[in-house]
Amino acid sequence: MRRCWYVLVAAALSGCAGCAGRAEKLFTIGFMPKLTGIPYFDACRRGAKEAAGELNIELKYDGPTSADSTKQIALLDNWIDSGAYDCLAVACTERDQVSPALKRARAAKLPVVTYDADSRPDARDFFVNMASYDAVAEAMVDAMAEQLRPRGTGKVGILTSSLEAPNQSEWAKRMKAYARRKYPRMELMDERTHGEDRDKGISQAKAMIQANDDLKGIIGLTSVAVPAAAEGVRQEGKKGEVKVTGVSTPKDMREYVKDGTVEVFILWNPVDLGYLTVHVCDLLRKGRMPENGTIEAGRLGKITVTNREVLLGKPLRFTKENIDQYDF
Amino acid sequence: MGRVGYWLVRHTPWLMAGAILALMVALVPAFSRPGYWLALGRQYFAAAALALALTPIILTGGIDLSVGSVTVFASVVIGALWRDLGLPLGWAFAGGVLAGLLAGLGNGLLVSAGVLPLVATLATRELFRGLAWTVSGARPVSGFPEGAGAVWYGSAGGVPVPLLALAVLFILTYVGVHHTWPGRMLYAVGDNERAARFAGVPVRSLQLGIYAWSGLVAGLCGASLVLKYDAAKVDAEPALEMVAITCVVLGGVRITGGSGHVAGALLGVVTVAALWAGLGSLASTWRDTVTGAVLVAVAVTNEAGARWAARRELVR
């Protein structure tokens, strides 16, 4: 079986000969979502592409096919080993498990910017946050409270992706504290998880409705959870009785807002989030990224940076009136 | 087709591997860095190790579909021993590898008792996934001490640690299969199990040994997953056994047993790793399609080649 060694060696040699002397390549950003194929991250990608075009940067977009930290780590390892990237922008599926992989990237002299969902602070250079955790958590609880009759009263379920998801766990913690303070008669139940899977989300929402006769509302913490909860409410025939709100995208929610299952939901602009992330990568490469201060980010203008955290802005409220103005 | 056609058909796995490697090296810039080749050994450690462990089994005409489940089971056992029972990390790892060995012994007992390997390991594949769910309580274990991951991602003399482990495993398998008498008996069993039995080959102990060995290797792979992902998760690596079998078959080992080479299995591993790493940066959605197509081509030509060879021998 000596032949197989010949083939191995010959292939390696011919390959090395073939690839000597390539054209100079552009600054390349590896842009990784939590998972590919959902409208939210497609919108982030669109903004990132726009900024990459402005700044003459090459953008490689790829990610796990499901929100699974092992898949994300495997892909990150491959990106780090390949040496084909100059900067990584990552939305972390899980904070603690993905952080060691990001640290390895930094050890290999790759700057790391997290966006949408943060890692441990020592595993990245900067985090691009869409809105402060408090602002989003309070906006969701307020949106639910104003729909409940009597106002701010009743049992409300929470549907989240996983108990370890960075943003969702921070929001849930703050939502409970805020509701206890501001709406003492609102009872927030423990989170149920759907693993970013729509069908599982629907069955969890239905289970919640069936198990709690006095359920008044469901707050979904991901762009998949809110439409899943709305679909669950619709299938159980509880439209109007069980209110649904949370964070999701206009594309995911249009149908449910139009037919009145959902009156209001919360989001920031994910296109701008992707756009800002690439600008942060670019400023980082130019050495013009302050740990505290303000930066100039293309069409977004002045943006504040606090303690290596870049803040996009305030959350937006989407209703029947304004949903058609947004196409992500 | 004549001599040239015959040669082409007989050597398809190597030609295919050579073509894929050359193509990937030409198209993907990362392959021009030797460091990337070495790093692939770390990325594909579990698949490679399991492919090497499966080779002796497939040579006897058997199969072990449970290796992926045993791997995950072992990793979850490590997590549970460490988190729930509070054992020191070293003991937890030893416990996980031992769990893998015991699982392999269980497979070996079933097969040597006469249950078809396909059926036996299809059953234990479900069994060990299920046990992994039970043991972990479906809660992933994470937050292992940082030093553990550093070993896995470290290197000795410029060579990544996992690649060294793979080299040791390869040498053990190579010597075991091609330079010992039990190794030669693998081929005898794969050719004709009944005849081998009548000729005095200890078929049962042989089977017990190779299935236990694959369990042990799966246990080590489980430990590697914990180090790699800094977590013990039940849903990690859902199709590991299929990747490993793909590697073995791509390397020209006959799935019905009796023919093949350990170096071929290694070649299959390199082919799959290069194919996947390359397609990952070229067109990640095409990965499984291309792998499937290559596998079909190799399977068809392998079979054709074997029949051709048999006919030529008859004519002569």
Image (cartoon, helix red, strand yellow):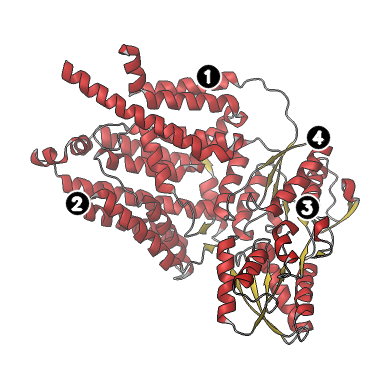
Depicted B3 relative to depicted A187: above or below: above
Asked whether, in this view, residue A212 is left or right of residue B67, the answer is: right
Q: Chain of mark 2?
A: B
In front: A254, or B79?
Answer: A254
Please name the residue that numbered disc 3 is placed on: A327
- Assess disc 1: are there few (<14), some (14-19) or many (≥20) residues with their C-alpha within 10 Å of its C-alpha: some
Amino acid marked by disc 2: Ser
Q: Secondary structure at mark 4?
A: loop
- Assess disc 2: are there few (<14), some (14-19) or many (≥20) residues with their C-alpha within 10 Å of its C-alpha: some
Please name the residue that numbered disc 2 is placed on: B112
Label 4, label 1: how many angstroms apart (C-alpha)? 33 Å
In front: A67, or B289?
Answer: B289
Please name the residue that numbered disc 4 is placed on: A56
Label 1 vs label 3, nearer the camera = 3
Label 1, label 3: how many angstroms apart (C-alpha)? 49 Å
Q: Is residue A311 visible?
A: no
